[in-house]
Amino acid sequence: MSIDKWLSDDSSKEEKIKREEAYKQLSKGEVQDLKKKKIRDIIEKEKQNLAMTLENDKFLQYILEFKKWLNTRTYLKGDIEKIETRVKNLYLIIQSNKRKIDEDEKKLLIEEYKSIPPKFIDEDTRVALNKKIRNMKRTNSDNYYLRKLKKIIQEKLNEAKYYKCLEKILELF
């Protein structure tokens, strides 16, 4: 079964035309509601970004408090347990932030993957990649196609280096 038949250009053009016609048929009030909804979505994204910066500020504040506390201590040997506890807390905060960032990067990467045209990768490799993305159990053939894709990618990246060099030569001369 091929993915190409699901993603034909004609159907996407038809859907776009239908969406535009539906939008034109909306009343002014409905159009305003849609615009308000879009604005709310944008504001919520900004709030999430603000929350991330506040978390970073809290982390920096925690580090500064630790530094201040450490500078006031004169005999650190007695405070080793407290220092270990604070360092462990800092490490846990860093790990939790790292997991959040990794999850966000994965979502962005999956969205980029969805933008790759179906004809760019053969169907077996695409199935193997989908299994890898969704952490599903892969067969030996899936692993074979992933290794094959990795080799192809390495070859293409090496070729890209040469093309960049040739492009620079053409621009300079």
Image: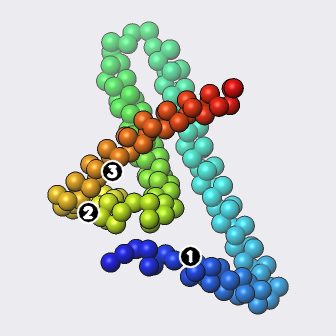
Can you tell which quarter of the image residue 144 is in? Answer: bottom left
Residues 72 and 25: in front is 25
Position of residue 173 relative to residue 119, above or below, is above
Residues 159 and 55: in front is 159
Crowdedness near tag 3: few (<14), some (14–19) or many (≥20) residues, C-alpha within 10 Å: some
Tell me the residue at 33%/15% (across/down). Answer: 78
Residue at mark 3: 149
Crowdedness near tag 2: few (<14), some (14–19) or many (≥20) residues, C-alpha within 10 Å: few
Q: Position of residue 10 (x, y in %)?
A: 58, 80
Q: Position of residue 24 (x, y in %)?
A: 77, 86
Q: Secondary structure at mark 3?
A: helix
Q: Choose mark 1 or mark 2, whichever is in front.
A: 1
Q: Secondary structure at mark 1?
A: helix
Tell me the residue at 47%/53% (across/down). Answer: 109
Q: Give yes or no for contact between labels 3 and 2 (Cβ–Cβ under 8 Å).
A: no
Q: Choose mark 3 or mark 2, whichever is in front.
A: 3
Residue at mark 2: 136
Which tag, 1 or 2, sits closer to the chain's start? Answer: 1
Can you tell which quarter of the image residue 20 is in? Answer: bottom right
Give the number of callouts: 3
Which amino acid does the dot numbered 1 rest on? Asp
